[in-house]
Image (cartoon, grey):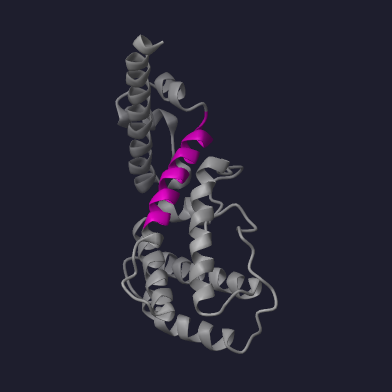
């Protein structure tokens, strides 16, 4: 059994490397053609392999999207969990929104895959979605730091923050018309939140299969 281990490890490493190369080529392709423009034939061409070889590593286009989702979600949660350099929960909230908006506006296909339902019929696998749950847990932690535990307020926060991103991407790409409103947005949310009770506790996971900010 021990003599077979090196060969098994080599094959697994080769498979992992091949999958990573395909996913990287997929991101390059959707950056040019849009998330829904992923073509297996073009993907194979860019990756320098044949179409059957792509299917040897991914059994469907949705499987490729799932690998992309998992990678993007892991990147996102690492970003949102990295140190904020402050003990002020309100300041941390502002930094978190800025990180979210900067990530999404500079990685539009990633934003669409993580936060929208751009691909009909696609749902991330439990393994890929686990990273999204971690980012949502971090959101709950940040909101709890300012006393917000009501699910209504959590839902309001996600709706408003993604609204800022949508407007920036759709109506002023590369600009700052909506990103410059972050402090106003946080101030407005905090002012309203302070007038509300916290009778309903936020849920431990999103109600829809998408990441949260």
- Residue 184 found in image quarter: bottom left
Residue 65 in magenta stretch: yes
Quadrant in the picture for the N terminus: top left
Which contiguous range is marked in magenta? 60-78
| Residue displayed at 34% across by 27% down | 18
> Residue 107, position in %: x, y?
37, 55
> Residue 19, position in %: x, y?
38, 30
| Residue displayed at 38% across by 17% down | 8
Q: Residue furthest front?
A: 2
Instruction: Report whether residue 165 is seen.
Output: yes
Residue 184 in magenta stretch: no
> Residue 147, position in %: x, y?
55, 79
Observer-nearest residue: 100 or 48? 100
Observer-nearest residue: 120 or 162? 162
Q: Residue furthest right?
A: 199
| Residue displayed at 65% across by 58% down | 207
Instruction: Report whether residue 213 is seen.
Output: no
35 w.r.t. 171: above or below: above
Labels in figure, total: 0
């Amino acid at each position: 059994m021990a003599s077979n281990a090196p060969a098994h490890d080599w094959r697994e490493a080769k498979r992992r490397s091949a999958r990573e190369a395909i996913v990287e080529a997929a991101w390059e392709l959707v950056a040019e053609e849009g998330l829904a423009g992923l073509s297996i034939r073009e993907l194979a061409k860019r990756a320098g392999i044949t179409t059957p070889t792509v299917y040897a590593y991914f059994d469907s286009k949705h499987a490729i999207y799932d690998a992309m989702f998992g990678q993007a979600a892991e990147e996102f949660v690492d970003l949102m969990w990295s140190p904020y350099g402050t003990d002020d929960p309100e300041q941390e909230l502002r930094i978190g929104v800025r990180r979210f908006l900067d990530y999404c506006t500079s990685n539009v296909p990633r934003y669409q895959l993580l936060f929208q339902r751009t691909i009909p019929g696609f749902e991330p696998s439990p393994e890929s979605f686990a990273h999204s749950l971690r980012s949502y847990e971090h959101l709950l932690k940040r909101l709890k730091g300012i006393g917000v535990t009501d699910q209504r307020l959590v839902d309001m926060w996600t709706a408003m923050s993604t609204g800022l991103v949508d407007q920036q991407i759709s109506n002023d790409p590369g600009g700052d018309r909506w990103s410059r409103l972050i402090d106003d947005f946080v101030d407005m949310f905090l002012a309203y939140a302070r007038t509300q009770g916290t009778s309903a506790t936020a849920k431990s996971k999103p109600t829809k299969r998408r990441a949260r900010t």
